[in-house]
Amino acid sequence: MKREIGLRREVIVDNDIAIDVKNLHKNFKLPTEKAAGLKQAIFNRMRGVKGYKNQRVLKGLDFSIKKGEFLGIVGRNGSGKSTLLKILAGIYYPSKGEVVVNGSLVPFIELGVGFNPELTGRENVYLNGALLGFSNREMDAMYDDIWEFAELKEFQDQKLKNYSSGMQVRLAFSIAIRAKGDILVLDEVLAVGDAAFQQKCNDYFASLKEHGQTIILVTHSMDNVKKFCTRAIMIEDGKIVANGDPKEVSEKYLNLFK
Amino acid sequence: MNIPNVLYRKNRILLKELTKTDFKLRYQGSVLGYLWALLRPLLMFAILYVVFAKLLRFGGDIPHYPVYLLTGTVLWSFFTECTTQGIQAMVHRGDLIRKIAFPKYIVVVSTTFTALINLMINLVVVVLFALLNGVTPSWTWLLVPVLVLELYCLALGVCFLLGAINVRFRDIASIWDVLIQALFYAVPIIYPVTMVANSSTLAAKIILLNPIAQVIQDVRYSLITTESITGWNFLGSPILMAVPVAIVMIILVWGSVHFRKQSKFFAEEI
């Protein structure tokens, strides 16, 4: 099957645009029959059946983000937010259109990517750090701080499978926030843990905002949109239906459910 | 295109860490641990030695036959391990591919590196065995790394090509498992090429066109005994001698190009 492919470019240019998205489309070719194996593929070809259907998830998005903006992206489940996020992060390729990322982009789409239950906490920290681009030596330098922040120091030599899920997420979060980039892409799953740890996370977001970090936040919490964001975008059925003041956009979002 | 240098540094760090993790995890939870990297080919060798050298008397007049056999099994184990793990690497690391953006070849290369490390350890054993067996060291030993590199390129090419197809059609891994069993008998590991050559020169020539056979025979020639039949002392024509190397290059280039093209869609297909 032939697939269309758009462009995603990473550049370093001295202007005030952090991300520029033009006419962005994303289609997924989903297999229509259950068995997506070689046998089905051959049968389908022989019978002249297309073995997939074209799912249009993003239908032409246009927007740009300026440096220093804290942009909220809202929309109901299945509206295409996560797909957009994954395209910005370079995990998916656009089907059509163009995405230009100016500077280094650090995505926090999921915490603890690559965490392995069979490895110790210590080993997982180094592995997860490598996924964020930190060398062993850089990890050595921040190693104690990570455990300090996670409040899990006494467990560092235990295997990860003996951690509770809350402990794992706290460790993952403590590593994730070490990542430094020009643009941070945050999925809301980041606000994790008990009330005390939540507070720590919120303080972290607030400090990022203070430092003028460029951030994209995908969330369902309109409180957070109003508290942190300088601008918000609402996506509905693969299209942008609102773009502007966080208060107005969150009103519009809440009206969806009335 | 303007790709910052930091990205290349990131890839190196990631490759190193993934290789380390892969190596650690492979023997996780086993009592003997890393020792298995050594024990597996040695035990396989022991079985083959008892069956083919002692019971069936395949070794015949080949000098240092045990080392000759061990060399073959070690190189073959490497090729099998490297390809079976490498083809599955993308599927096994699906969690990473779905969630972060990085060059996908790193996953394949890190897995093959683990196999390569195992091969290095095993080759040390082969050399020790050779010395104990009375093989005299020679300058031709220096050719072995080049030959290993050739075999590695072939394995990597296979991993790229079949690994990319395996993302969509998981049948590939199973087909390869069967194919590699068949391939084992097409490569002169347990039987000497001389045995084939005695009954059919043509068959022996065809066997030697296979790059795996060519590498194994060449390593045996340069490491153990000049009485080994190799492509260049048996095939006769320079064009035929170039065939195995050409096969390796075609598979590596074809595999890398195909992998590179397909890798943009791995995240949504895996």
Image (cartoon, coloured by chain):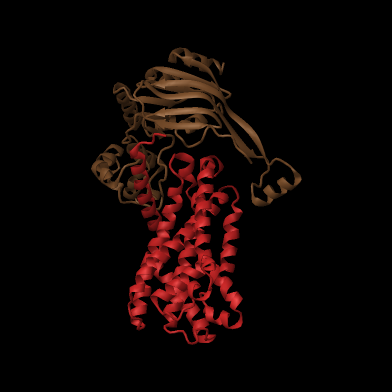
Chain colours: A brown, B red
Q: Residue at left 28%, top 41%?
A: A147
Between A34 and A172, the residue placed more toward the observer is A34
Residue at 53% x, 56% y: name it: B251
At which x and y percent is residue B113? 40, 57
Residue B232 pos. (x, y %): 48, 72
Residue B25 in view in this figure: no
Mark yes or no: residue A99 visible: yes
Q: Position of residue A233 (x, y in %)?
A: 48, 19
User: For this rendering, which residue is in front, B64 or B89?
Assistant: B64
Note whether A153 is above or below B196 in the view shown.
above
Relative to B227, is A17 above or below? above
The image quadrant of residue B65 is bottom left
Which quarter of the figure is the C terminus of chain B placed in?
Answer: top right
Is B161 left or right of A161, judged from the image as shown? right
Q: Is residue B198 above or below residue A36?
A: below
Quarter of the rendering containing residue A232: top left
Looking at the image, residue B77 lies above or below residue B57: above
A220 relative to B135 in the view: left or right: right
Q: Report which quarter residue A128 is drawn in.
A: top left
Q: In the image shown, does A88 or B242 lie closer to the viewer? A: B242
Quarter of the picture containing the N terminus of chain B is top left
Q: Position of residue B19 (x, y in %)?
A: 38, 54
